[in-house]
Amino acid sequence: LGLAGALDRVAVRPRTGDLRRWQDWSLITSQPLGDRAMQDCGYPYYHLHRADLHRVLVDPVAEECPIRLGHRVAGVDADGGGGDGGGARLRFEGGGEARADVVVGPDGIRSTVRAALFGPEAPRFSGMSVWRGLVPAEDVADLGLPLVSTAVLGPGQHFVYYYVSAGRFVNWVGVAPSDTWALESWTTPGELADALADFAGWAPIVLRLISAAAGPDRASTLYRWALYDRDPMAVWGAGPVTLLGDAAHPMLPFMAQGAAQAIEDAAVLAACLQLVPGPVRALRRYEDLRRERTAQVQLAARFNEVTFHLPDGPEQQERDRRLAAASGEKASHRNAWVFEYDTDLATAHL
């Protein structure tokens, strides 16, 4: 994409990915990421703030073509009213419409485009909610947090933290069971007391990071939302309309692959539109190339949901023994199938 320089300016390259125990902070396993990612994949392993990633992706596009905002889609007619090859028609809330040769719906887990194609269907609630905080690195400098990605595993829940925005902030995410919290918005404020209660008894570093997101001398960056996903889809599109990202394959965050899979989708879709004759054929080829891959990641995330959250006891101890045996260089192979996927190779035969 030609964005390596822009990414390097805002991203962080963690040296390792570490797994730790929730109470005593003991190290379970460590997976090399920095130099090993370059060696195995030819590209860095990045941590990014989502807003930074948006800017890196949007800025070069905005220089080439207009981006129209303020248009909420109310419905999609797959044939545009013109029969086969007639493109598609978008209808907007408040009136107005637009026609296009191709419509791509990257509009999230509650996609309007998906509902227009296949009818409304509620996503699956996981029974968990997510806490998220963004902490200025200088506020927790005394902790001496190394430049690594750290996941802390506990019974029924876990906690992750890592640096973002060129190291200026520490982003943390805590996942905990929730029978009542069903709000999905990423901008719903959370209560500090509730977050601390969810992680009571955890290692002091975890509690310190949680507290730092809601300091008394500045605006809180503590948010909470419910976790949903959907089962893998057998069909993604119809006619000149298709889906991309969470609209097609919403997944739990336990593979850290939601945004990455959407970017892979986009790269494969672009190649298909460029190389496959006819827009409708191009969309079906794109879907065929991506369906199995994204379903595999969706199901792997569900598997990790169980594995990460084992209750303390024999199964958890066996999990930790297996992970410890795969520490160091061996650990890199655990997720090789995720990181070594190459969209150029996937589309080379088009």
Image: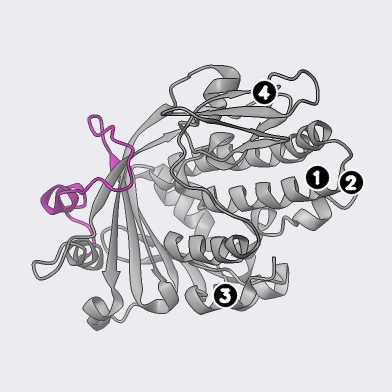
Where's residue 183, x and y in %? 28, 35
Give the CA distance from mark 4 to mark 2: 25 Å
For the point 87% across and 47% down, which residue is it? 275
Which range of residues does the magenta coloring cover? 176-203
Give the CA distance from mark 3 to mark 4: 37 Å
For the point 67% across and 23% down, which residue is it? 78
Please say if the residues under marks 2 and 1 sit with CB atoms less than 8 Å apart.
yes
Give the CA distance from mark 3 to mark 2: 30 Å
Where's residue 294, x and y in %? 64, 40
Query: Residue 197 magenta-drawn?
Result: yes
SS class, disc 4: loop
Q: Is residue 231 visible to the viewer in this orientation of the structure?
A: no
For the point 20% across and 47% down, which residue is it? 198
* View extreme (front): residue: 96
Closest to the camera, between mark 3 and mark 4, is: 4
107 to the left or right of 158: right
Q: Amino acid at mark 2?
A: Leu
Please say if the residues under marks 3 and 2 sit with CB atoms less than 8 Å apart.
no
Q: Is residue 184 visible to the viewer in this orientation of the structure?
A: yes
Where's residue 24, x and y in %? 27, 64
Where's residue 214, x and y in %? 16, 62
Tell me the residue that label 3 is attached to. Answer: 6
Which mark, by number, is residue 78?
A: 4
- In this view of the protein, which residue sits in the foreground, 300 or 139? 139
Q: Earlier in the sequence, mark 1 or mark 3?
A: 3
Magenta residues: mostly which secondary structure? loop
